[in-house]
Amino acid sequence: MYNVDMKAEHLHSLVWMSRPLMQAAEACVEAGLQGTELTVRMRAVLEILQRHGEQTVPEIAARLEIKRQYVQLMVNETLSGGFVEQRPNPRHSRSPLISLTDRGRELIEGIVSKELAVMKTIGADLDAEDIETALKVVRAVTGKLKNLAGD
Amino acid sequence: MYNVDMKAEHLHSLVWMSRPLMQAAEACVEAGLQGTELTVRMRAVLEILQRHGEQTVPEIAARLEIKRQYVQLMVNETLSGGFVEQRPNPRHSRSPLISLTDRGRELIEGIVSKELAVMKTIGADLDAEDIETALKVVRAVTGKLKNLAGD
DNA sequence: GCCAAATTGACATTTCCATTGTCATTTTGA
DNA sequence: TCAAAATGACAATGGAAATGTCAATTTGGC
């Protein structure tokens, strides 16, 4: 049927737009990091800590859905940059909580608010409801694709 | 404003969903390639040729937006697999047109139709209009992000 | 038609992101 | 209490893609 096929076709296009979208987004983030001492992956760590508070390395890894060994590397970089510090973890003495320093907090707040401003610009002539719809669809599709791959 | 901020927030979420979506999509494609002799990047070459007809290596690179040197590698793999062949290029005798062989055409058609079937499954309980809206929004956002990065 | 500039294939090197593997040390839970 | 899991540290590997380079064509301006 015409409609059915168009639907699958559009879905296909939507899914394959994910790569260009991701690349464009990463390029923008990188551009916004110019002038700071942060790398994209350090920024990712700081953002998690800003949103969710102090976390252990394995917790951050779980949120980012990447291996803890790699996150350890990312976190160590942010540690030596002085953007985060280790704080004693009452639940687990060997695995310290990684926590934003004042410097790290200021930096990530500035960066995130600049990024949000960019989002406002970009959203200026887009309909708010359409954006919500897009988010809903993309989340649903991602979930379903993940299930399929998991089988 | 509440609405303005929510809009930017949703846009932010949408943009950052692009990575999980892409990863899930690639995992599915990879799963669908099991049993064939194709790799993901060989499949990409075949799909371009199926959609757009025979092309030179630099043309394929332009479509994929990656460097010709890497595409050359991908194409050479598909050549040695017997999925494509070189045909004389009337416009340019040094740069042959890469063209699907019968074997390559059958393979890519089977794979693409399997993938479309997956898309139909995934779209089953999604609204066709919502999907179109999502595609429209994602395309617009990607375009704007690219412009910003290009400045 | 000539010649400089661009294109192309081929190959080598490098970078970046991320996974995998391993080990000694905790930590946890049955 | 003790086996199993979690953690940090570090090494090795894999893979995608960029970058660098070269010789052979090809093209376009004159």
Image (tube, coloured by chain):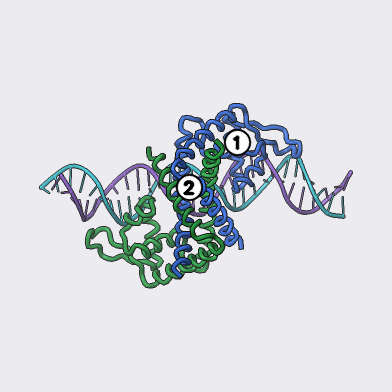
Chain colours: A green, B blue, C purple, D cyan
- Image position of A11 with respect to B15: above or below: above
Which numbered circle lies on residue B22? 2
Looking at the image, is B35 positioned above or below residue C1?
above
* Image x and y of residue A1, in percent: 54, 35
Asked whether the viewer can see residue A37, the reply is no
Residue name at image x 53 percent, y 53 percent: B138
Residue A110, which numbered label? none
Q: CA distance from mark 1 to mark 2?
A: 26 Å
Q: Residue A60, image x and y in percent?
A: 35, 57
Q: Nearer the viewer, residue A66 or D20?
A: A66
* Residue nearest the observer in this picture, C11 or B122: B122
> On what subunit does the disc labeled 1 rest?
B
Q: Residue at x 46, y 70 (%)?
A: B1
Q: Is residue B14 above or below residue A80?
A: above
Residue highlighted by disc 1 = B76
Q: Secondary structure at mark 2?
A: helix
Foreground mark, 1 or 2, reads 2
The answer to which quarter of the image holds residue A147 is top left
In the rendered structure, the answer to whether residue A20 lies left or right of residue C18 reads right
Quarter of the image for residue D14 reads top left
Q: Amino acid at mark 2?
A: Met
The residue carrying pointer 1 sits among few (fewer than 14), some (14 to 19) or many (20 or more) residues within 10 Å by Cα, namely some
Quadrant housing the C terminus of chain A: top left
Mark 2 falls within which chain?
B
Asked whether, in this view, residue A56 is left or right of residue C3, the answer is left
Disc nearer the start of the sequence (1/2) = 2
Q: Along the line of sight, which residue is nearer the eye, B83 or A134?
A: A134
